[in-house]
Amino acid sequence: MRLPRYFADADRVQDLESRLVTCMVTLQGFTPEEAKRKPFSGTGAPMIVTDPFSGVGQRSVMTDLVAWIASESRGMTIAPSTSHPKERLAYQAGEKLFYYRAGPYDFGCITCHGEEGKRIRLQNLPKMTNARDAQRAFGTWPGYRVSEGELRSMQWRMWECIRQMRFPELEFTSDASIALITYLAKKAEGGTFDAPSLKR
Amino acid sequence: MKPKTILTLALCVIGVAGCATRTSDSEAERAVAEMIKASFKTRGQASVDRLKQDEVQALCSKHAGELPKDASDAIEKAQQATIRYPSSGKLIGDWRQGERIAQSGTGKQFTDDPARPAGGSCYNCHQLSKQELSFGTIGPSLYQFGKLRGASETVQRYAYGKIYNAQGYSACSNMPRFGHNGILTEEQITHLVALLLDPDSPVNK
């Protein structure tokens, strides 16, 4: 399990979803806007209905593809590459973003994921700087979320955390999203990739 | 060559290893600044302006977990000075309304209606009443908060102030500055003070 990593043709670090966008554009003839139009599936929950990419009962082909490709990596060791300077830069930027507190609630990723054994309501929170917690968190996305009745990807997980942090919307496959995922992948290094999984 | 660059080079000669770290760190900082600008977009009430850090946010991000004592003292002093107490002087409201505010976790998200009042998200992180089993543990348990402390004016002012601006008491606290950042109104905060201190509140049963 090597993603995110640097791809020379795109000259950037890419996670699975941003790589798929590149392939859809360069090999299949989609425009970038078409490739990114519907990153997440719709469920009918109010939050998702208002999302420009989704609607009631509409599936995201992107998420379906992500789930199938991830399933092919099940059982592999999480082994992100840090040999390219842009990979190291993405990791360092991701780390800084992880500690970046802002917005009306002063939240950052660190607020919920900086201490061991904490929870929000009854939801357990992984401490992302702890290898075991990071391995379980990183290694289980994409996952099927029972509470939403939907399959969700790692890009969605970032997007949704950022929404709850009261930040503006995190753009799908943006550099910040990939930097955060790169940071998490490195923290989860050595763990076993176990997705797609079942989530609360 | 700018004076700052000359200084950096001079420091490089003194300590080569330290310099390599510093250089890549500033590159990462530039990358982050670029990402903050390019990776987010305004949606609903959550405008991109929210990503601009105030002084406290910048310090707390930079020194996560290891804030120097003098910086910590300075933050607490400055944030303490922002606390505005209700002009009526009445700090204890209605605990029943406080319980509803404590239960509600909505407000300020781009999916929330800005016309509706925000909740306090208290149960997300704290135990309060014994009846509510679904509580978080990021903050300490507040069960029997008033029973243990009484409801003197000092305790009332502490509870109100802490909710208004937690950083006035604990620099870089995880707790949002509910009054200072306009999440809750003064009146809503008095209802939460009642939830904590009123002898009839389930928190003190």
Image (spheres, coloured by chain):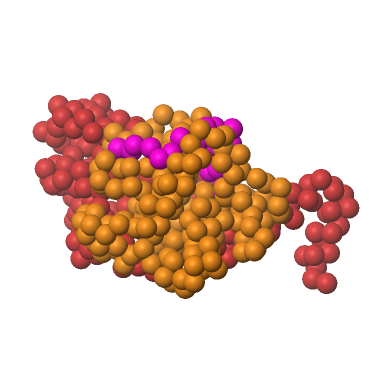
Specify whether B198 is left or right of A17: left
Give the side of residue A171 with respect to residue B86, left or right.
right
Q: Residue at x 61, y 39 (%)?
A: A79
Residue A140's quadrant in the figure? top left
Q: Nearer the viewer, residue A184 or B177?
A: A184
Give the extent of the magenta segment: A182-200
Residue B144 x %, y %: 22, 28
What residue appears at the point 41 percent right and 70 percent down from the top-left corner? A34
Q: Is residue B26 magenta?
A: no
Give the residue at x 30% y 43%. A145
Q: Is residue B126 visible?
A: no
**Placement of the N terminus of chain B among the 4 image quadrants:** bottom right
Identify the hue of chain A: orange
Horizontal and vertical percent position of residue B174? 41, 43
User: Considering only vertical position in the picture, is A99 above or below B204?
Assistant: below
Q: Decide which of A14, A69 is in the foreground and name it.
A: A69
Q: Quadrant of residue B122?
A: top left
Q: Colour of chain B?
A: red
Residue A5 visible here: yes
Tell whether position A185 is magenta: yes
Q: Against B1, is B199 above or below?
A: above
Q: Is B42 placed above or below B123 here? A: below
Percent x, y of residue B162: 34, 44
**On-image quarter of the C terminus of chain B:** top left
